[in-house]
Image (cartoon, rainbow, N blue to C red):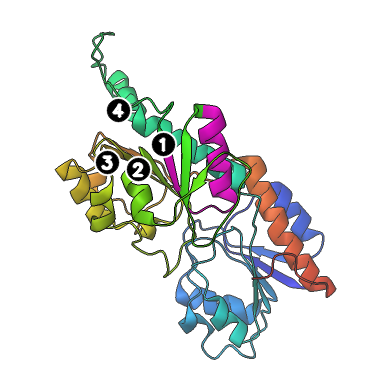
Amino acid sequence: MVELYITRPLPDRVLRAAEERFTVTVRTQTTPLKKGEMRAALVLYDVVIPTLGDLFNADVFDGMEGARCRLLANFGVGYNHIDVEAARAVGIAVTNTPGAVTEATADIALMLMLMSARRAGEGERLVRAGKWSGWHPTQMLGLNLGGRTCGIIGMGRIGQAIARRAHYGLGMEVIYHNRSARQIDTPARQVGALDELLRMADCVVLAVPGGDRTRHMISARELGLMQRHAHLINIARGDVVDEEALITALDKGEISGAGLDVYEHEPEVPEALRTRENVTLLPHLGTAALDVREEMGMMALANAIAHLDGEPLPNLL
């Protein structure tokens, strides 16, 4: 039997399916692999299913031309933790799981938009602390998103799903910035310059892939262009936002609030963000629904099975 290594526990349905075709080893820890563990996995197993945080950089692949592993079937659509070119150079293919995460991640974006604009996290903490004195006309006034402008940065599958929710669900005008021209079904307008979007949007949503191209895409200069009542939402990758610049912008009142599901040095979250009432923080819940995680696992497994059977890989990067 072909040896399959899974770097984190996956849903039972996925594991049962994997055991039908492979000899499966599941690492029980929920923390990212260390460099030595990654190199050992490449030597000991035919296929590895890694995920977010398993940093397969060029150093990990150094000298691995004759390694046993021939496929990294990534569990997740994002793959900026894997140096795909370095993997290819030693004959290791890399796949991902596009599509499976789209709707669930877009839901989290919408939730963060509403929570940030309507001060939902702050309100819940007030009630839980027993400090709510009752309704009154000027209590916790937030921003009504209906009729406002949603600016989406990155118009891939997830960006388009967010646009649908913002326009049809909340009645927002949607503008978007994308590296290339992109026509979408939802009523929306593409703007050529990122600066234009930042100046116009009441809510800025980041839906770009991670990697060197987008690292610190939103920093001090960009935050300074946003409207003072605007909210920044990040469901992309943590390092798309310069967290220190975000903290400074919030301190100066350059923006009204932020909703974050990802962090620059995850799982570390700066105290300056954790203690702010106008920042909504989630523990990377983007795809955290059982059916979604099962679909992601089955898609990763489909890539592994195609490799086993000598078929074209469905999601080859």
Q: How many marks?
A: 4
Q: Closer to the N terminus: mark 1 or mark 2?
A: 1
Q: Which residue is mark 3?
A: 227
The relative height of residue 314 versus residue 2 in the rendered view (above or below) is above
Q: Which residue is mark 2?
A: 200
Question: Is residue 148 left or right of 131 when viewed as pictured?
Answer: right
Sort mark 3 into few (<14), some (14-19) or many (20+) by Cα contacts within 10 Å.
some
For the magenta stretch, what is the residue range?
A: 150-169
Q: Which residue is mark 4?
A: 122
Q: Closer to the N terminus: mark 4 or mark 2?
A: 4
Sort mark 1 into few (<14), some (14-19) or many (20+) by Cα contacts within 10 Å.
many
Q: Closer to the N terminus: mark 2 or mark 3?
A: 2
Q: Position of residue 263 (x, y in %)?
A: 37, 53
Q: Is residue 283 visible?
A: yes
Sort mark 4 into few (<14), some (14-19) or many (20+) by Cα contacts within 10 Å.
some
Q: Secondary structure at mark 1?
A: strand
Image quarter in which the C terminus is found: bottom right
Question: Is residue 21 left or right of 31 when viewed as pictured?
Answer: right
**Three-letter amino acid code at disc 3?**
Gln
Q: Which residue is mark 1?
A: 149
Q: Residue 63 falls in which quadrant of the image?
A: bottom right
